Image: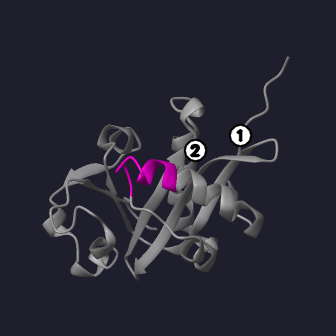
Amino acid sequence: MKTKVMIPEKAKISDVKPMHKLINYYADKDEMLPRSLSEIYENIRDYYVIRKGNKVIACAALHVCWEDLAEIKSSAVEKKYIRRGIGALLVEACMNEAKELGIPTVFCLSYKPSFFKKCGFSVIDKNDLPQKVWGECFRCSKFPNCDETALIYHFKGDV
């Protein structure tokens, strides 16, 4: 029996509630920042999802911060699908979009730095990021004592 290849797709409005549930499952474990339904609806164009059948099993967002900087955020894979390359497919989709948009640098804040290192990101000091990227941090229960790892990816050559 041939298995269906899972392909990242741009999220649809009907994906918001399952994405909200998935993201906040990890947020409840202090593994990522929670997202409200309204925030996901307002930023739906940032999100990619992977579905198994009609069910959303993973999501990630590429959020443009400035002309030369974007962030990958809300990267979540349903627990039983972890370590199957699904997260990497979502990061690749986000990175391809950043490149298409001409954004030379992508960063993320993560409790899973080894995953992002495998995707080509490098660890950096959080203080090296522009202050603009900290706009959501005040909502975090750990603010101002952030214990996430900052990682960055610079596209080489023309973007």
Q: What residue is shown at x 37% (from left), y 77% (from top)? A: 68
Q: What residue is shown at x 42% (from left), y 54% (from top)? A: 27
Q: What residue is shown at x 30% (from left), y 43% (from top)? A: 113
Name the outermost residue toward the right: 1
Left or right? Give the position of 131 relative to 45.
left
Quadrant in which the N terminus appears: top right
Q: Which mark is residue 89?
A: 2
Q: Which residue was labeled with disc 1?
A: 6
Q: Nearer the viewer, residue 124 or 131?
A: 131
Name the outermost residue toward the top: 1
Q: Are marks 2 and 1 in contact (CB under 8 Å)?
A: yes
Above or below, 92 against 41 in this view is above
Above or below, 98 against 91 in this view is below
Instruction: Give the magenta part as a residue range.
Output: 24-32
Q: Amino acid at mark 1?
A: Met
Above or below, 57 against 129 in this view is above
**First in residue order: circle 2 vs circle 1:** 1
Query: x and y percent of residue 82 in the render?
Result: 53, 33
Residue 27 colored magenta?
yes
From mark 2 to mark 1, how far is it between C-alphas?
A: 8 Å
